[in-house]
Image (cartoon, rainbow, N blue to C red):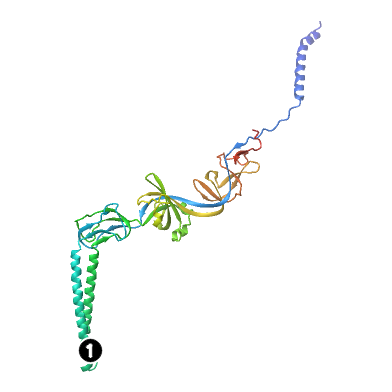
Amino acid sequence: MTKSKKIITIMLPGLIILGAVIASFILVQAKPQPEKKPAAEIARNVRVVTAHEGEVFLTVHTQGTVKSKQQIGLMPQVSGKVVYVADNFVAGGRFKKGDVILRLDPRDYEYEVTSARSRVVESRQVLVREQAEAALAKSEWDLLGHGEASDLTLRKPQLADAQAKLDAAEATLRRAELDLERTEIKAPFEGILISKAVDFGQYIGAGTRIGEYYSTDVLEVRLPLSSRDLSQLDARALQSGTSDLHVTLKGQFAGIENTWKAKITRTEGLIDSKTRILYAVAELSGDQIYSVDAKMPVSIGQFVSAEVEGRHFQNVFQLPRDVLRQGNKLLVVDKDNKLRSRTVNVIESNREFIVVTEGLKEGDIICKSQLGLDVDGLLVKFEQAGAPQKSEGDKS
C-alpha cells in the first residue's frame, strides 16, 4: 500500500464523523422555531369599596364630667344657736327651692322686732303732733302775721325732723324683721347637700360655713375641643355664642349604659395656653337630666362620653380611612380592571373615614388594600355585591 493511501485510510473515519456533526448542526438550525406566546398577566386580589354620593353629618367625639351649674357654700347672715335641722340635712340630702334647711334661735330677733315696732309707733305720733302744730302755726300767721313767714315760724324743720325719725324707725323695723326671717336658712334653689359642717344645738356666727350645696335643676359638662375638633364644628358661631349644637352624652351607672340629650350653650372663651384646648359647656335641665330610655337621672361627678353635632355636607363621598394614600390620592379601578391613581379633594379625615368633595363620581370603585408604591396600571380582581369580578389573565 502506498503512503498516500495509508494516510487516507487513517483520516477517513474522522472525516466521516466530522461531516455527520456538521450535517446535524445544519439540520437543527434549519428547523422552524415554534411561535412564543406572551406570559399571561396575573391579577392581584384586592379589597374595594364603591363610592356613593350623599350627605354627611360630622360628629365630634369628646368627654367630660357632669358638674352642677351652681355650687355654693351655705352661710347664715345672722348669729344664733341651731334649734332645728331638717331630716335630710346630711351629705346627699336633697331639697326643693324654699325648703327650710335649719333654723336658729329666733327669740333675740323677735325682741328686736317688737322694740322696733314700738319706736315706729312713737315716731309716728311725734310726726302727727308736729303736723298738727305746723298747721296751727300757719293758720295763726295767716290771721296775725305780716309778710312772709319763716320756715321756723311754720315749724318746717321740726316737721322734717319728725318725718326723718319715722323713716329711720321704719327702716330699723324692716331690718329687724329681715334678721328674724334670716334665722331660717332655706334652700336657694333645688339641689343636693354635698357636705355639712354644723349640727343641732351648735352656736354659729354670721358667715359661718354650714355646708356645701349644689344645684340639681341645671347641670353642666365641660367638653374639651382641640383645633381639629373645632374644624368639624361651626367654630365662629360657637365662639360668638349663637350656636345651639346638640350633644349626646353616654355614661354607665350600675353597669348599665344610659344616654342623655344636651345642648352646648357657650364656650369658656379662652384657649388653654398649655394644652391648646377650648372648653365648650353642654347644659342639661328639666327632662334632659333624665336618660332617654330608662329615665335615669345623670349624677353629679359622673364621667360621660359626648358626641357633638358637627357640620353638615351635601353631595359628598364618605369613604373608609384606609383608602387614602399619600398626597390625597386614591386608587380607582378603571374599566379594564386596572388601578389608576387619582388626586381628590379631602375636606375631612379622621381615624374612621374621609369626606371627599371633588375627584370622584358616583359608582367609582376604590381600592382599600395596602399595596406597593408603584401600582398604577396594576391588573386586579375583586369581589363586589357577592359576585367575583374577573379580569384579563384570570383563567380560573
Residue 154 in the image: above or below residue 63 = below
Q: Quadrant of the N terminus?
A: top right
Q: Quadrant of the C terminus?
A: top right
Q: Look at 20% across and 71% down and name the residue there.
A: 116
Q: Look at 43% across and 56% down and name the residue there.
A: 263
Give the image location of residue 342, x and y in percent: 60, 46
Q: Is residue 300 left or right of residue 77?
A: right
Give the image location of residue 69, x and y in percent: 36, 57
Query: Where on the picture, by quarter, is residue 212?
Result: bottom left
Q: Nearer the viewer, residue 19 or 98?
A: 98
Q: Amino acid at mark 1?
A: Lys
**Badge 1 element:** helix
Residue 28 in the image: above or below residue 135 = above
Question: Does any portion of residue 272 appear in the rendered image?
Answer: no
Q: Nearer the viewer, residue 153 or 229?
A: 153
Q: Look at 19% across and 74% down and name the residue there.
A: 119
Residue 257 in the image: above or below residue 142 = above
Q: Is residue 35 left or right of residue 348?
A: right
Q: Nearer the viewer, residue 271 or 206?
A: 206
Give the image location of residue 181, x and y in percent: 24, 65
Label 1: few (<14), some or many (≥20) within 10 Å?
Answer: some
The residue carrying mark 1 is 138
Query: How many numbered marks are there?
Result: 1
